[in-house]
């Protein structure tokens, strides 16, 4: 048997059970208390009258009182989205998921587990992305207990298990993606938030299913370069933005110059030789691509002076 099969054999599974109504049992326990009190009073009266059955009545009252007190220990309540795991002398007997007032074997150990959705707001972690750049990353995980038997018996402390495995999953996720500017069609941490969140949720599901925990949502709440490289990366991003803007400006300027020359030629407004065309193109590109305001110079002479 390989290790995976052995792990599958030792995994616990939840066994739903229904507990007895607490109100019915409370009525029976109340009758036991009344019977114990009545037997005690009758026993004292019998002893006072020197009747032999007085001792038996006192013994019966003590027995009834012990039964009533023991039965009272089996009463318990459950709120909505709350479960009770029943354990009898170390053996798992089942899980009660219904809300209300119930009674169970008084010797059953009852471990309460909340079935409500919980938020795990992870701390900021400093890790290296796929390219080795140090980044800061944090995530929030919404989870709830799905299998109470696994949560109680397959891990030592399921809440601590969720916290540790969530941090490990976030670290592993960050190392598998670049922060930004990846290869063509590559998913990055900053650009592919939906895909990254889906990958994080899937990894958490695989890790936390061993503890009977269901992950409802997982998203990044913080993503930034580490402080030691943040300034350099900001300058790089600014430079890339300037280059992209320049490329767009030059492309537009060339299109406008081409359109102007084409219109002049088609409408026979002006016939220019190659040298004058080059000068015109140069002047138009300076006007269209320059950052500073352009001051026109009016030529009052001829075209060739």
Image (cartoon, rainbow, N blue to C red):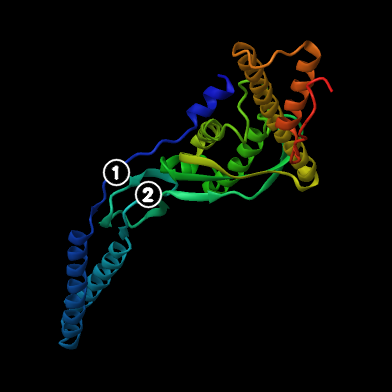
Q: In this view, does 245 lie above or below 4?
A: below
Sort mark 2 into few (<14), some (14-19) or many (20+) by Cα contacts within 10 Å.
Answer: many
Q: Residue 298 lies in what quarter of the image?
A: top right
Residue 86, image x, y percentages: 37, 49
How far is the residue under mark 1 from the one under mark 2?
9 Å
Q: Quadrant of the N terminus?
A: top right
State whether residue 111 is above or below residue 143. Answer: below
Figure quadrant of residue 265: top right
Give whichever of 154, 169 is nearer the camera.
Answer: 169
What residue would you read off at disc 2?
86
Horizontal arrangement in the rendering, residue 216 relative to residue 1 (left or right): left
Which residue lies at the image location 74% right of the left edge and 45% below the top edge? 226
Q: Residue lying furthest right in this view?
A: 305
Where residue 191 appears, as percent x and y from the top left, is: 60, 33
Disc 2 secondary structure class: strand
Q: Assign the C terminus to one quadrant of the image.
A: top right
Question: Where 72 sits versus 155, above or below?
Answer: below
Query: Dot 1, how many residues are within 10 Å of its Cα: few (below 14), some (14-19), or many (20+)?
Result: some
The single residue placed furthest to the front in the displayed view is 301
The picture places residue 297, in percent across and down from the top left corner, at 78, 35
Marks 1 and 2 close (CB-CB < 8 Å):
yes
Q: Which of 127 and 294 is in front in this view?
A: 294
Q: Which residue is drawn at 45% across and 47% down?
A: 90
Mark 1 / mark 2, whichever is N-terminal: 1
Secondary-structure class at tag 1: loop
The residue lying at 73 percent from left, 39 percent from top is 238
Of the pair 96 and 53, the residue shown nearer to us = 96
Direction from residue 2 to residue 97 in the image, left or right: left
Q: Residue at x 78, y 21 (%)?
A: 303
Residue 63 in picture, x, y percent from top left? 26, 68
The residue singled out by tag 1 in the image is: 17
């Amino acid at each position: 048997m390989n290790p995976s099969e052995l792990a599958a054999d030792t995994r616990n599974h939840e066994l739903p059970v229904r507990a007895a109504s607490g109100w019915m049992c409370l009525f029976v326990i109340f009758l036991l208390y009344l019977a114990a009190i009545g037997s005690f009073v009758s026993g004292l009266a019998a002893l006072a009258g020197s009747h032999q059955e007085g001792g038996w009545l006192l013994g019966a009252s003590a027995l009834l009182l012990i039964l009533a007190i023991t039965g009272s220990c089996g009463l318990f309540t459950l709120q909505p989205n709350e479960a009770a795991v029943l354990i009898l002398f170390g053996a798992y007997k089942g899980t009660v998921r219904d809300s209300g007032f119930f009674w169970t074997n008084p010797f059953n150990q009852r471990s309460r587990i909340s079935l409500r959705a919980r938020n795990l707001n992870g701390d900021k972690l400093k890790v290296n992305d796929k390219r080795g750049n140090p980044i800061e990353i944090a995530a929030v995980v919404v989870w709830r207990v799905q299998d109470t038997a696994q949560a109680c018996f397959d891990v030592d402390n399921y809440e601590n298990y969720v916290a540790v495995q969530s941090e490990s999953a976030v670290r592993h996720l960050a190392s598998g993606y670049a922060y930004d500017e990846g290869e063509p069609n590559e998913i990055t941490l900053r650009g592919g938030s939906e895909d990254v969140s889906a990958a994080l949720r899937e990894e958490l599901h695989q890790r936390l299913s061993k503890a009977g925990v269901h992950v409802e949502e997982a998203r990044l709440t913080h993503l930034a370069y580490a402080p030691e490289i943040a300034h350099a990366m900001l300058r790089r991003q600014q430079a890339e933005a300037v280059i992209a803007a320049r490329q767009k400006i030059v492309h537009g300027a060339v299109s406008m110059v081409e359109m102007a020359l084409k219109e002049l030629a088609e409408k026979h407004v002006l016939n220019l030789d190659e040298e004058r065309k080059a000068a015109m193109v140069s002047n138009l590109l300076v006007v269209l691509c320059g950052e500073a305001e352009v001051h026109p110079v009016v030529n009052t002479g001829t075209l060739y002076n």
